[in-house]
Amino acid sequence: MIHIPQMSPLMWLSLFIMFSTMLIMFNYTNYFSFKYSPYLPQKKSSTKSSLNWKW
């Protein structure tokens, strides 16, 4: 029979806390590293292009 070492509950708790903290920090950095630039509609120029398409 193969003996598989088991982790104590406190080790599982610390592992869970560590990975949860990593996930929160990763999301925190991604959220605040995004620079929001508001959409400003550009005024469309009323001049039409001077291309003459001859089909």
Image: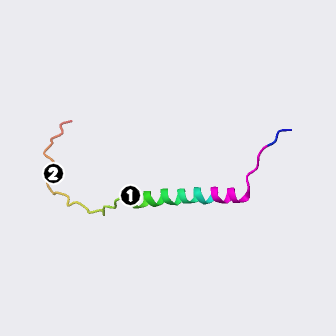
- The secondary structure type at the circle numbered 1 is helix
- Residue at 26% over, 63% down: 40
Q: Amino acid at mark 2?
A: Lys
- Residue at 78% over, 43% down: 4
Q: Residues within 10 Å of mark 1 (few under 14, many from 20)?
A: few
The quarter holding residue 31 reads bottom left
Magenta segment range?
Answer: 4-15
- The secondary structure type at the circle numbered 2 is loop
Q: Point out residue 54 in the picture as x, y percentages from the top left corner.
A: 18, 37
The quarter holding residue 36 reads bottom left
The residue pinned by badge 1 equals 33
Side of 22 relative to 2 (left or right): left
The residue pinned by badge 2 equals 48
The quadrant of the picture occupied by the N terminus is top right
The one of 40 and 29 positioned closer to us in this rendering: 29
Q: Is residue 49 magenta?
A: no
Q: Is residue 8 magenta?
A: yes
Q: Amino acid at mark 1?
A: Ser
- Residue at 67% over, 60% down: 13
Side of 22 relative to 14 (left or right): left
The one of 18 and 36 positioned closer to us in this rendering: 18
Specify the farthest residue to the right: 1
Picture disc at residue 54: none
N-terminal of the pair, mark 1 or mark 2, is 1
